[in-house]
Amino acid sequence: MEFRLDRLITFSLMAPIAKLRSEPDISIPILMYHSISDEQELGKHAYYRTNTRPRVFAEQMGCLHENGYSSASVSDATLQVKGDGLNPEKHVVITFDDGFADFYRSALPVLARYRFQAIVYLPTAYIRDVRTQFKGKDCLTWDEVRELSRCGIQFGSHTVSHPQLRILSPAAIDEEILISKNTIEDKLGCAVESFAYPYAFPQTDRDFKKMLRDSLERAGYQNGVCTIVGRVGHESDRFFLERLPISSADDTALLEAKLAGAYDWIGKAQALAKRFKTQIGNFTSKKTRSMFSGTSDHALYR
């Protein structure tokens, strides 16, 4: 088995600590899936893999069922953020990013077997009446999306073109957020309430987060999910709800540990690392400005 530091820390340190909690756990796990296929991700470390083999996915859904979990919507999770609604002890939210066609072929039958609901986030530029591809993989067609909707699958926005939002202008961000929402609503005839942030979420950039939250609110979204690792609790931001990344690299033991909260430390560690990196960058920038303040242009190039 490939060595994983995150797995070692989770089982050797965090899982035992989680078992010592005396207070009831009031968090809801949101699972983040992408592709359900047998495609191999050669050369990728297990932590960065996003593909889940159909056999493994079936085992994971069976694990949820055997452990007494029921699926919930993202709206249910936001109710928990407010401190009311569901008892979160045995509820899980199942999400899929990117709108890949293998959801229809491989995920839906398994979800139906266990009567689990799920939400699929669509990058609408790649969802068309004829089959197209995104990241080299087939995407759903609108006919399939409509059929899935009739089966109880929910849909949310994953922007139009799946860009790095942080490098776009505010106007371009508004377009990505609003046009994708309007497109799905026009195609399905129902409201789109949830948004999934593409790529790694810049959780320490407060100005960007405020701007994005304002944009989501103006567009009429009620909630959103991102790539911050962890489970949803009372301190979670309803527009940037934490998720647990799941792939073929997650056996049932690791999945159960993630559900129990033993993997939440990853999100906290990543946030600390990003803050440290930002502070170092700010300090270096200030030192550079201090060194060159009052220095002539001629001196800088000598």
Image (tube, grey):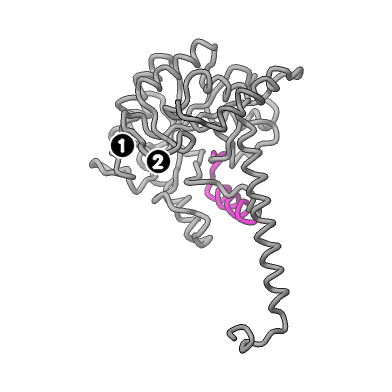
Specify few, some or many for label 2: CA neighbours under 10 Å numbering under 14, 14-19, or 20 or more: many
User: Which of the image's four quarters has the N terminus?
Assistant: top left
Per the rendering, the mark at residue 140 is: 1
Q: Residue furthest right?
A: 22
Mark 2–mark 1 Cα distance, whole angstroms, equals 9 Å
Considering the whole magenta stretch, tell me its main secondary structure. helix
* Of the pair 22 and 113, the residue shown nearer to us: 22
Q: Residue furthest left?
A: 130
User: Magenta span has 215?
Assistant: yes
As drawn, 95 above or below 298: above
Counting from the top left corner in percent of width and height, residue 270 is at 62, 42
The amino acid type of the residue labelled 2 equals: Leu
Counting from the top left corner in percent of width and height, residue 201 is at 55, 46
Which element carries disc 2, helix, strand or loop? strand
Residues at discs 2 and 1 in contact (Cβ within 8 Å):
yes
Residue at (71, 79) in percent of width and height: 293
* Of the pair 261 and 151, the residue shown nearer to us: 261
Give the residue at mark 2. Answer: 122
Specify few, some or many for label 1: CA neighbours under 10 Å numbering under 14, 14-19, or 20 or more: many
Residue at (36, 29) in percent of width and height: 36
Counting from the top left corner in percent of width and height, residue 107 is at 36, 24
